[in-house]
Image (cartoon, rainbow, N blue to C red):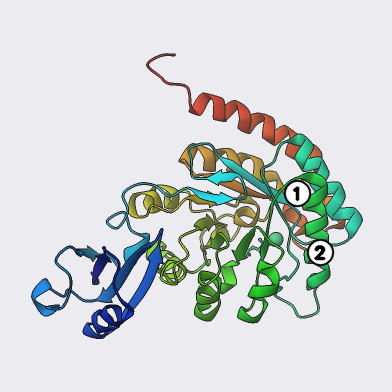
Amino acid sequence: MATTTVIECSPPVSQQDIEEILRTFSYSKHIVRNGKHFIIGNGKISRKELPFIHDSFTLKYVDSPFPLCSQEFQAKKSVVKVRDIEIGNGSPVIIAGPCSVESREQILTISTNLAAAGCHILRGGAFKPRTSPYSFQGLGHDGLKLLAEAREMSGLPFVTEVLTPVDVELVAGYADMLQIGARNMQNFALLREVGRTKKPVLLKRAPWADVVTWLQAAEYILAEGNFEVVLCERGIAATQASSGRHLDLAAVHKVQNLSHLPMIVDPSHGTGDRRLVGPMALASLEAGCDGLMLEVHHQPETSLSDKEQAISLEDYDGMLKKIKLLNSQMFVDPIKA
Ligand code: PEP
Ligand code: MN
């Protein structure tokens, strides 16, 4: 297990002290969180080896490959705020919308209907990662403008994917939450760049990644000082799975035992089949996740991307009724009931 030394420097230190401590480690990072300075260093360094550090500094040894994400660092579960929506507060959050923003009419129709039906956060891709270079690549900057208009009309904050480090500033200028897609889970330059923003980040799990590798990817974002990270399970590669994809619901439990970060599930990409989205959404909530990401389209058959998994607004309505019923049952106190 990789041991790190986490030094909580309080009272505040001078830049010179910080630089001196940083040099003690073979590799280290300095972050500021809630006004507190932390230095995270590779290896286990004792107080004796840091003769110049202040007596009141707290030294913590975290035996974890993802120290800042770990429950050893923070036992209390994190709540991530996207505008006034809280993810991780015990009540599931629903993120819904089309795979891609396709037109003004499409995104305004979908977002206003979702808001009326009940939805917390709108989703929609403006920059799309597509397997084929000849497939619809998204509307780019125009798509961001349309999402901003949809937010204005519907009142829903939105999450959208950012594909490259150079686009982070542009996308962060519009979006309420930045999505890192499954394909980019280990794009370290991109992870660092979103870590330098103050925007909440939705980090999807790569289909080939185990839970530890996924949390290490999240660690890149936290190590830049951005703790506003939500994890999203979206199906892993599994050759024996009935559909070629496997929605790893056991990961909900595993992650929640390892990390303080909230975690949601995306049964749309996790199944690739609209008939399975509803049942897997309910199963995800039963598994104890903090929310769902659902692909919804007003005319699913015309979707320019991920058509097979898009559910209609009518199906969304029906699904939401079941979710609300399940949710009310989930939070009934069994002793009082
Ligand atoms: C998406 O959310 O539309 C998407 C491309 O997801 P993923 O990165 O999980 O494939
Ligand atoms: Mn999609």
Q: Is residue 297 visible?
A: no
Quadrant (top left, top right, bottom left, bottom right) of the N terminus = bottom left
Relative placement, left or right, of 200 versus 121 is left
Identity, as a three-letter code, of the amino acid under mark 1: Val
Which of the two marks, 1 or 2, is nearer to us in this view?
A: 2
Q: Is residue 16 above or below residue 302?
A: below
Q: Which numbered disc flags the more N-terminal residue, 1 or 2?
A: 2
Question: For the residue labelled by badge 1, is the local secondary structure a helix, a strand or a loop?
Answer: loop
Q: Judge by depth and name the residue closer to the eye, 57 or 336.
A: 57
* Crowdedness near tag 1: few (<14), some (14–19) or many (≥20) residues, C-alpha within 10 Å: many
Q: CA distance from mark 1 to mark 2?
A: 20 Å
Return the x and y of residue 298 as percentages of the image width and height.
85, 47
In the image, ligand 1 is in what quadrant?
Answer: bottom right
Please name whichever residue, 131 or 227, is drawn nearer the observer in this view of the structure.
227
Please tell me whether mark 2 sits on a helix, a strand or a loop.
helix
Residue at 57% across / 67% down in the picture? 182
Q: Please provide percent x and percent y for residue 223.
A: 41, 71
Q: Tell me the quadrant of the picture where the C terminus can be found.
A: top left
Which residue position holds label 1? 296
Relative to 181, is 141 on the left or the right? right
Q: Is residue 26 visible?
A: yes
Which residue position is annotated with label 2? Answer: 145
**Residue 118 percent across, percent down from the top left:** 71, 36
Binning the other alpha carbons within 10 Å of mark 2 as few (below 14), some (14 to 19) or many (20 upward) gives some
Q: Residue at x 55, y 39 (%)?
A: 92
Q: Position of residue 37 (x, y in %)?
A: 33, 67
Mark 1, ligand 2, within 8 Å: the answer is no
Vertical position of residue 319 compared to residue 162: above or below: above
**Residue 68 against residue 107 in the figure, above or below:** below
